[in-house]
Image: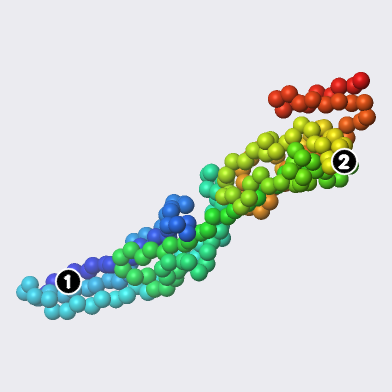
Amino acid sequence: VGETTTTTTGTVIVHYKDTEGNTIAADETDTDKVVVSTTVTKTEDGEVVSTVTTPSGATYDTTDYKHPSIETTEGKVYKLVEDKTVGTESGTLPAGTTEVTYVYELVKGDVVVKYEDKDGNPISGEETGGNTSVKDEDQADTGTDYDTTDKRPGVITTADGTKYTYVKVQEGSDPETGKVTEGTKTVTYVYRKVEVGETTTTTTGTVIVHYK
């Protein structure tokens, strides 16, 4: 009488995809070649006389690998879409390879530019399109480069003819350049009122104040 023992194994792989099916992070192995069952086969004179398979009772659970959000090296932020998960996240480990795919949606963000005087009062003029604030990026993909300097006029002339000259980026403001993040980044430019007797000219973005 001869007897041979064989084992069957199971592996569980976790994938991370965006809503378009693109890979956004490296695969993870939740379970790697774990024994699912053991089979003992008895033979006599070359003939199989009995085969007994015993399940191991192994289980798996991929929820440890279900990240609420993923940020790529490029600064793109993705959030988990719970109801789009593909595959069974937990249970008795099957033989072979089981795949679970978590699906994520790319997060968007805004960049807003505000114009204020030195006392924090909003100002607007023809140079700002008559607006006290404008959007530099509107629901752009996170990780997108932005630059608000093209929305920083050297002089703002209000509707009543009052002129304001650019001073600085407000302390605590978001930076003029960077990457779009989730939510809203606000860049605030501060201007000083031009007094009577001053004249202003702009040359290639530089403001020159003359006193007469």
Image check: 204 left or right of 18?
A: right
- Dot 1: few (<14), some (14–19), or many (≥20) neighbours within 10 Å? few
User: What is the x, y in percent for residue 68?
Assistant: 56, 60
Q: Which residue occupies 82% across, 37% down? A: 157
User: What is the x, y in percent for residue 111?
Assistant: 67, 47
Q: Nearer the viewer, residue 28 or 100?
A: 100
Q: Which callout, 1 or 2, points at the residue further toward the start of the chain?
A: 1
Q: Residue farthest to the left?
A: 45
Relative to 65, does residue 93 appear above or below in the rendering?
below
Q: Quadrant of the N terminus?
A: bottom left
Q: Residue farthest to the right?
A: 196
Mark 1, secondary structure of its residue: strand
- The residue at which mark 2 appears reads as 160
State the colouring used for the structure image.
rainbow
Q: Nearer the viewer, residue 80 or 165?
A: 165
Relative to 18, does residue 49 appear above or below in the rendering?
below
Q: Nearer the viewer, residue 92 or 43?
A: 92
Q: Nearer the viewer, residue 169 or 66?
A: 169
Image check: 124 left or right of 18?
A: right
Place residue 87 in its image quadrant.
bottom left
Relative to 129, does residue 85 appear above or below in the rendering?
below
Residue type, numbered disc 1? Glu
Residue type, numbered disc 2? Asp
User: What is the x, y in percent for residue 2?
Assistant: 13, 71
- The residue at which mark 1 appears reads as 3
Image check: 63 left or right of 191?
A: left
Mark 2, secondary structure of its residue: loop
Q: Which residue occupies 42% across, 57% down? A: 21
Q: Are marks 1 and 2 in contact (CB under 8 Å)?
A: no
Mark 1 vs mark 2: in front: 2
- Dot 2: few (<14), some (14–19), or many (≥20) neighbours within 10 Å? few
